[in-house]
Amino acid sequence: MNKIVWCLCAILCFNAQVWSQETAQKVELEEILARISTQHKVSFNYQSGILDDIQLSPPPTEFSLTLQLAYLEERTPLKFTRIDASIIAITKTMQICGYVMDPGSNAPLEGVTIVTTNASTLSDASGYFKLAVSDPTTRVTLSHLGYGVMEREAGSFDTKDCGPVLMIPQREELRSIQIDAYLVKGIAKASDRTTLIDYDQFSLLPGMIEADVLHTVQALPGISSLDETVSNITMRGGSNDQNLILWDDIKMYQTGHFFGLISAFNPHITQKAQVIHNGTDAALTDGVSGTIHMKTDQTITTKFKGIAGLNLLNAEAFADIPLNARSSVQLASRRSLDEVYRTPTYTTYFDRITQTTEADLNEVEVTNSDQTFNFYDVGARWLYQITAKDKIRLNALVIDNELRFNETANVGQEQQTRESSIAQRSYAAGLNYTRDWNATHATRAHIYESDYILRAINADVLESQRFLQENRVSETRVKLEHRMTQHNWRTLLGYDFTETEIINLNDVDVPRFVRRDEEVLREHAGYAQVHYTNPNNTLFVRGGVRANYISTLDTVLLEPRLSTRVALGKHIELQALAEFKHQNTSQIINFQNDFLGIEKRRWQLSDNDSIPILTSKQASLGMIFQKKSWLLDLNGFYKEVDGITTQSQGFTTKYEFAREQGSQETYGVELLLRKKTGALSTWISYAYLDATYRFESLPEISFPSNFDVTHTLTVGSTYSTEKWDLSAGLNYRTGRPTSIPLAENSVQDNQIQYAEANQERQPDYLRVDASALYRFKLGNSLRAETGISAWNLTDRQNVINDYYRINAQNKPAQFSRYALGLTTNAVFRLIL
């Protein structure tokens, strides 16, 4: 009781002192600070003018320094911060306020989050908010579902009248997330059963130290690369040219650096990706086996962001630069290190793409020297919010790969050297304009130009011959579509025009031969689609149809599309998807094994003669079980692709030089089981595949596809915290089909005679990977991350291809190409 009395007395005395001080004569704040500085041996740092026109009664001299500063903070719009024992910084606090509204309807927005570095609040039902900030330069961030994130300085708010603050709608079609952390954090399943990858949230997968989209997708069931390259990804048993690869709605004809070993798309500017196996949106065409759509960030930033990094393959840089409150630009670039220093990792990759293949068959020794390989990519994205209803996006991308080497041999009695080279280059640009008429209607116009060039010069030192090959693709597309949203219904209407030109050139100097083929194909398409989701999100239906008219070939194709999902209770969902698709381009594979073993692929247009239009039909059924931390995803599918050619299927043994047309029938089962425990995510994915060719004009009408990998199994685990990402995993698959020469009479008329097509299997493939990434701070705004990865930890020798050539004894000689052995990489990045 006595303690309580003493506390009450102390409080009354303190208040009496303050009250008596308040009644004292007011003086300038600068005079008060001078007295405190003398009394407590401290100095004050502040901007000029911050103390002007501030008068008050001085605090009691018997107060401690802490109490005197608290007294001043309570009675002035200033904040006093102790820098050290003798220095005190003074900053001016202020109140910001406003009414957050939708710019189209002027309706107030409730629940908008307003955040500074040390304070936050929410807008009320009238859209009103107020928040204390330290000074006018404080960055204030406003965010709300369905609207773009807005970042402004505190001084830009109307603090006198609390004026309106207009949020900019984010009209990109939002895909409802049904399953978060599908595999690891950052990989999710949408309501239409497409897979979404968000690299802002992404953690880590085994063997990776960066967010490489085309490597990430290979962790999903049904997607793999039989030769470890990102340019030869197979989706549900289809060849790589049957995949549609989009970068911000631009179709890309080149996807890899190092001739496919790493992705050509800078991971820092590629923020999101969507993977579609089946039930494709009616707005998309091409890609009879599947679609991978990469996207840049669609948010206008008002704060500079930068990344600079270095790994053992390339240097990288990225910048997100605000131009003003309505516009920002992103720039990203990577360049290989070979011109500066050839790292062991670079050497391993280089040796992988340039495996010598036929050196043992030459009677004259040929040596390769001065081998140089370089690559770079440059990407840019500009966003401009013209008005609250009008937005422009401009994209540009350049990709370049170039290999040069010398071949030297003694021809006659003279030593001769000739240079060979191969280069791949892509140039792409796209313009997207969106107009939001109101809350229910939006129109989008998109145009792009995508160009690809492959140029190879093979200088044969033995034959004194130079062989030039060129493949050029130039594609222009214009798309116009209108979206209508009403309650739980969405309707899409659109028109699409595409013009594709492909040029193939063969030029031989001795004997002189030149052939140049130029083809142009034009296609018009109209599409309509309806999308319904019931109020409690237990039913999703999206159905549409696409009508295509290929004017060059006078061909009409109707393509229905369907995607449905229904929830059965709380934990189980069923899904059904179906589609018809077509595409007008395919890749012809030229194996030039004396060209350091590099495989050259040439794009060609369908002509409805030697190269038919590729058409496909696919259906799939599946179920998802989700309870607590467990997830089970099971799908079965059936797919037919008509119009394939032997030239596009990668034959390296029997039928390598055949030119026939056929079809492929594929069915399979895909399964994913995932368990999430706190920061640890563990998964097992399995795919069963049966893919069969049918070529009516070949002696063997039906036989296993080159991509008929019966069993594929992936096991992985990722541990992810704020500072650490650790991941390890195993990849296994049965060997791919191959053909072997006959045991007897294996060579006739200078041609190898093979047993039945694709009845043998290459050895099974097994690879173990691991990676680690550590993040740390170097200052208030500067962060860093460093990591290391190991690919094929056991250094297993995996065969990825076999072929045969006739040797000097007139016998078939077997040659094999191998996947990467033990390959390590390391990275260090600075992030601002």
Image (cartoon, rainbow, N blue to C red):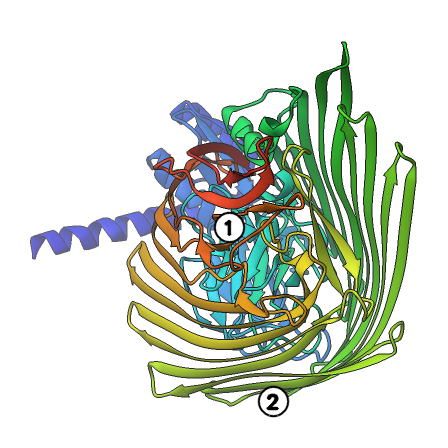
- Three-letter amino acid code at disc 1? Leu
Q: Position of residue 28 (x, y in %)?
A: 57, 38
Q: Position of residue 471 (x, y in %)?
A: 81, 48
Which quadrant of the structure image shows residue 321? Answer: top right
In this view, 260 is above or below 588: above
The residue at the far left in this view is: 1
Q: Quadrant of the C terminus?
A: top right
Identify the residue shown where x is 8% and y is 53%. 2
* Depth order, front residue of 50/281: 281
Q: Position of residue 600 (x, y in %)?
A: 70, 44
Identify the residue shown where x is 14% and y is 55%. 5
Q: Quadrant of the N terminus?
A: bottom left
Lower sequence index among marks 1 and 2? 2
Which quadrant of the structure image shows residue 669? Answer: bottom left
Q: Secondary structure at mark 1?
A: loop
* Depth order, front residue of 67/417: 417
**Marks 1 and 2 close (CB-CB < 8 Å):** no
Query: With 72 as the anchor, is 684 left or right in this view?
Result: left
* Depth order, front residue of 413/637: 413
In the rendered image, which residue does mark 1 sit on?
742
Q: Position of residue 24 (x, y in %)?
A: 46, 45
Q: Is residue 387 visible?
A: yes
